[in-house]
Image (spheres, coloured by chain):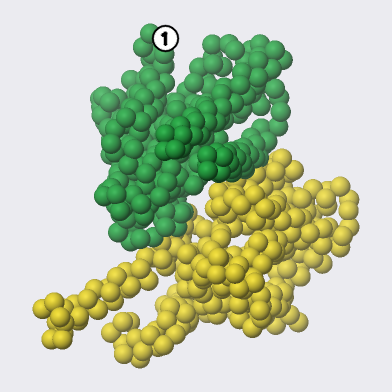
Chain colours: A green, B yellow
C-alpha cells in the first residue's frame, strides 16, 4: 500500500517537473518563433551588431532577474532594483570619472558593495522591522531614486568624461563572448548551482513554500531573508556598473522603471509569485525573451510604446498559467490518491 | 510627543487614528507658522488641488487594503484614462460624452483587476503590478509621448477655479461628496462590516455569509472608476492629457492610506485617519516644495513616510510586548521565579 502511494507521489512529482520543463520549453519555442519570424521579415535582425545588442541587454536584465528570482522564491519581492541600479551606476560613474586609473574589476566590486548596502537596508527593514517586503521596497524604490536625484541634480556623466579603459570593457570579449555576457553567465551559473545543490539554496525554497514549516524545521528564516535581499541588492549594484559600461551616459534617471521588466522576466521565466518554485535559469531565459521582444519591435517597425504593454500582458499571462498548472497538479494528486484508496 | 500624557492617553484611547489627526493638524500649524507663503489663500488652494488626486484614489484604496488586497495599478489607470480623454477629444467627440466614458473606462479597467483576483484567484499584488505596466503601456500606445492641451476653457477653468471666486476650490465638492459616500459605506453599512470581516479572516467572513469574491470584485471596479474620474480631473486641472500623467502616484496613495492607520495586513483601519494621512502627506509635500525642495527629493520623504507608517506601529507593539514580559518576570506571583 505504502509503496503504491510513494510511486504515485513520485509520478506526480515527475509530472510537476515535466510541467516546469514545459515552461522553459515554451519560452525557447516562443523565442524560436519570434526570432525566426523577425529574421525572415528583416534579416538585419541576425546581424552581428543586432545580436550583440540583444546579448548585452539580456546580460544586464538577467543579472537583475537572478536577484529577483532569489527574493521571489522566498515569497518576497524587491521593487527597488531599478533605483539601486541607478544609484550604483551614478556612484561608480562619478568615482571612475575622478579616478581614471581605477581597474574595471574594482569598479565592479564597488558597484556590488553599494548595491549590497542598499539591499541590506531593505533586508533589515523586512527582517527586524517586520514590514512587508512590498511596502519596504516600494518605499526604497523612491528613497534610493530620490537620493540619486539629490546627488546628481540635473548633471549627467557622459561617455567622453569616462576613461577609455572603462568603456572599452563593454567591447572586450573572451573567445568572442563579450565580458558583460560572461559575467551574467557566471552569476546565473553560480546562483543556479547554489539554489539547486546547496543547503542554503534548498532552504530558500522551503521558506517560500511554507514559512511556518520552514521555521519549525529549524531553518534560519531571518538570516536567509537578510541574505536574499542583500544578494538581490548586490546584483542590482553589479548591474548598475554593467549599465554604466554599456551606455557610457548616466544621469539620475538611469534604470527608471526597470523593476517591472525584472519582475516580468522572473515571473515569465517560471518563478512563481507565491514563492517556493522556479529557477534562475528560467529567470535568465525570461530576460532573454523580453530583450528579444524589445529589439524585434524596433526591427519590425512596430510602435516602441507597445513594449511596456507587452511586459504587463506577459506578467498577467505568466501568473495565470502558473495558477492553471498549480490547480491541475493539485487535481492530479487528489485523483491519484483517490484511486489508491 | 510620547512624553505628553494627554497625547499618550489620546493615542491609547483611539490609537494611531487619533494620533495621526493630531499630527496632521500640528503639521498644518507648524507649516503655517514656519513656512513663508504657506498660509496664503492662494497656496491653500494649491494644497487642495495637489491633495485631490491622492485623496480621491485613497478612498477606494482604503477599502481594498482593509480587505487584505492592494491595487498598485491606480496611477496607470489614471494615465490611461487621461490619454484616452485626449485621444477622443482629438477625434472630435464632445467633452460631455468623453468624461462619463472615461469614468466607465476606469471601471472596466478595475473590473479587469477584479476578474484576475476573484475569478482566477491570483494575488492582487502580482496582478496589479502586471496591470500597472499594461495600462501605462496602453496609455503610451494611445497617445505616444505627445500631449493634448486644447480642452474647452469652461472645463479647465472649472477644475482650477473656486466656488463663486471665493477661497474654496470647485474640485473640493466632488471630493467631499465621494469622501462622505465612502465614510458612510465603510463605517455605517453592512458592506463596510463585510469589508472589515473579509480582511480580518476571509474564511470566517465566507462562513458568515459574506460574499467575499463579489465584494472584492466591486471594490476593484470602484477603485478603477474613481481612478478614471481622477484621470479626468487631473487632465482638466493641468489642461494637458499625457500618457505619463500621475506616474508614480501609487506610492503617495499607498503611503497616505498606511499613514492613516490602515493595516497592510488587512482588517483594520478607519476613514478619518486616512483623510488625515492624506492631509499630512500633502501638507509636508507642499511645505517642502515652498522651501525649494525638488520633486525627486520629495519622493525620499514620501518613501520614508510609507515605510515608517508600518514600521512605527510594529516597533510600538514589540516594545509593549517586551515591557509586558519584563513586568511578568518582576511580578512576585510569577511561578517561574
Compare residues A200 and B160 and report the one nearer the observer: A200
The image shows residue A144, relative to residue A232, as above or below, that is: below
A87 w.r.t. B58: above or below:
above
For this orientation, the residue located farthest to the bottom is: B6
In the picture shown, does residue A119 fall above or below B167?
above
Give residue B19's position: percent from left, percent from top: 42, 81
Q: Give the image location of residue A195, x and y in percent.
A: 35, 33
Instruction: Indicate left or right for B73 with A53 as reference.
Output: right
Q: Residue at x 76, y 68 (%)?
A: B157
Q: Report the side of A47 relative to B226 (left or right).
A: left
Q: Outermost residue, left direction?
A: B337
Q: Which chain hosts label 1?
A: A
Residue at the image position 52 percent from the left and 28 percent from the top: A18
Name, please, the residue furthest toward the top: A175
Residue A8 seen in the figure: yes
Q: Is residue B135 above or below residue B225?
A: above
Dot 1, crowdedness within 10 Å: few (<14), some or many (≥20)?
A: few
Task: Find disc 1 in the rendering and name its residue.
Answer: A176
Q: Quadrant of the C terminus of chain B?
A: bottom left
User: Element at badge 1?
Assistant: loop
State whether residue A153 appears in this view: no
Quarter of the image for residue B233 reads bottom right
Residue B144 in picture, x, y percent from top left: 70, 41
Instruction: Say which residue appears at 73% left-offset and 68% top-offset.
Output: B159
Amino acid at each position: 500500500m505504502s509503496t503504491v502511494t510513494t510511486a504515485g507521489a513520485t509520478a506526480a512529482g515527475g509530472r510537476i517537473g515535466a510541467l516546469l520543463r514545459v515552461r522553459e520549453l515554451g519560452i525557447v519555442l516562443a523565442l524560436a518563433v519570434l526570432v525566426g519570424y523577425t529574421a525572415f521579415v528583416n534579416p538585419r535582425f541576425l546581424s552581428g551588431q543586432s545580436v550583440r545588442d540583444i546579448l548585452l541587454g539580456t546580460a544586464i536584465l538577467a543579472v537583475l532577474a537572478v536577484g529577483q528570482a532569489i527574493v521571489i522564491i522566498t515569497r518576497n519581492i524587491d521593487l527597488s532594483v531599478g533605483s539601486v541600479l541607478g544609484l550604483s551606476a551614478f556612484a561608480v560613474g562619478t568615482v571612475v570619472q575622478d579616478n581614471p586609473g581605477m581597474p574595471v574589476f574594482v569598479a565592479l566590486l564597488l558597484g556590488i558593495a553599494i548595491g549590497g548596502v542598499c539591499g541590506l537596508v531593505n533586508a533589515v527593514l523586512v527582517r527586524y522591522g517586520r514590514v512587508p517586503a512590498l511596502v519596504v521596497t516600494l518605499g526604497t524604490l523612491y528613497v534610493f531614486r530620490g537620493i540619486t536625484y539629490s546627488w546628481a541634480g540635473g548633471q549627467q556623466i557622459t561617455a567622453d568624461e569616462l576613461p577609455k579603459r572603462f568603456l572599452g570593457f563593454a567591447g572586450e570579449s573572451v573567445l568572442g563572448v563579450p565580458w558583460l555576457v560572461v559575467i551574467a553567465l557566471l552569476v546565473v551559473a553560480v546562483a543556479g548551482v547554489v539554489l539547486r545543490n546547496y543547503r542554503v539554496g534548498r532552504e530558500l525554497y522551503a521558506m517560500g513554500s511554507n514559512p511556518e514549516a520552514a521555521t519549525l524545521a529549524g531553518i534560519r528564516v531571518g538570516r536567509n531573508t537578510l541574505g536574499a535581499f542583500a544578494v538581490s541588492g548586490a546584483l542590482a549594484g553589479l548591474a548598475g556598473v554593467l549599465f554604466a559600461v554599456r551606455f557610457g551616459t548616466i544621469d539620475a534617471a538611469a534604470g527608471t522603471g526597470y523593476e517591472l521588466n525584472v519582475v516580468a522576466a522572473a515571473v515569465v521565466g517560471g518563478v512563481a509569485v507565491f514563492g517556493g518554485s522556479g529557477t534562475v535559469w528560467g529567470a535568465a531565459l525570461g530576460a532573454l525573451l523580453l530583450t528579444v521582444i524589445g529589439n524585434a519591435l524596433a526591427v519590425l517597425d512596430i510602435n516602441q510604446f507597445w513594449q511596456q504593454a507587452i511586459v504587463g500582458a506577459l506578467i498577467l499571462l505568466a501568473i495565470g498559467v502558473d495558477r492553471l498548472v498549480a490547480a491541475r497538479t493539485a487535481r492530479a494528486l487528489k485523483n491519484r490518491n483517490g484511486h489508491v484508496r | 510627543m510620547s512624553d505628553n500624557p494627554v497625547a499618550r492617553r489620546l493615542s491609547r484611547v483611539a490609537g494611531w487614528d487619533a494620533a495621526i489627526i493630531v499630527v496632521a493638524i500640528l503639521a498644518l500649524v507648524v507649516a503655517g507658522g514656519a513656512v513663508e507663503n504657506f498660509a496664503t489663500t492662494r497656496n491653500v488652494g494649491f494644497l487642495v488641488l495637489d491633495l485631490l488626486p491622492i485623496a480621491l484614489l485613497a478612498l477606494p484604496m482604503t477599502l481594498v487594503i482593509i480587505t487584505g488586497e492592494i491595487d498598485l495599478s491606480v496611477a496607470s489607470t489614471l494615465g490611461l484614462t487621461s490619454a484616452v480623454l485626449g485621444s477622443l477629444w482629438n477625434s472630435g467627440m464632445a467633452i460631455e460624452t468623453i468624461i462619463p466614458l472615461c469614468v466607465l473606462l476606469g471601471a472596466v479597467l478595475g473590473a479587469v483587476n477584479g476578474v484576475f483576483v476573484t475569478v482566477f484567484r491570483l494575488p492582487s499584488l502580482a496582478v496589479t503590478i502586471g496591470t500597472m505596466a499594461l495600462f501605462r503601456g496602453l496609455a503610451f500606445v494611445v497617445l505616444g509621448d505627445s500631449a493634448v492641451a486644447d480642452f474647452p476653457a469652461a472645463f479647465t477653468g472649472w477644475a482650477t477655479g473656486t466656488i463663486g471666486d471665493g477661497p474654496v476650490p470647485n474640485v473640493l465638492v466632488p471630493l467631499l461628496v465621494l469622501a462622505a459616500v465612502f465614510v458612510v459605506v465603510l463605517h455605517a453599512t453592512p458592506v463596510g462590516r463585510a469589508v472589515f470581516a473579509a480582511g480580518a479572516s476571509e474564511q470566517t467572513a465566507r462562513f458568515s455569509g459574506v460574499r467575499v469574491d463579489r465584494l472584492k470584485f466591486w471594490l476593484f471596479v470602484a477603485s478603477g472608476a474613481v481612478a478614471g474620474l481622477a484621470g479626468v480631473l487631473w487632465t482638466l486641472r493641468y489642461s494637458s492629457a499625457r500618457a505619463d500623467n500621475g506616474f508614480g502616484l501609487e506610492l503617495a496613495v499607498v503611503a497616505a492610506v498606511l499613514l492613516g492607520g490602515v493595516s497592510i495586513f488587512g482588517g483594520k483601519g478607519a476613514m478619518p485617519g486616512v483623510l488625515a494621512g492624506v492631509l499630512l502627506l500633502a501638507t509636508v509635500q507642499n511645505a517642502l516644495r515652498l522651501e525649494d525642495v525638488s520633486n525627486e527629493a520629495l519622493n525620499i520623504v514620501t518613501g520614508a513616510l510609507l515605510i515608517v507608517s508600518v514600521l512605527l506601529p510594529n516597533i510600538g507593539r514589540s516594545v509593549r510586548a517586551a515591557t509586558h514580559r519584563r513586568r511578568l518576570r518582576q511580578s512576585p506571583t510569577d511561578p517561574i521565579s
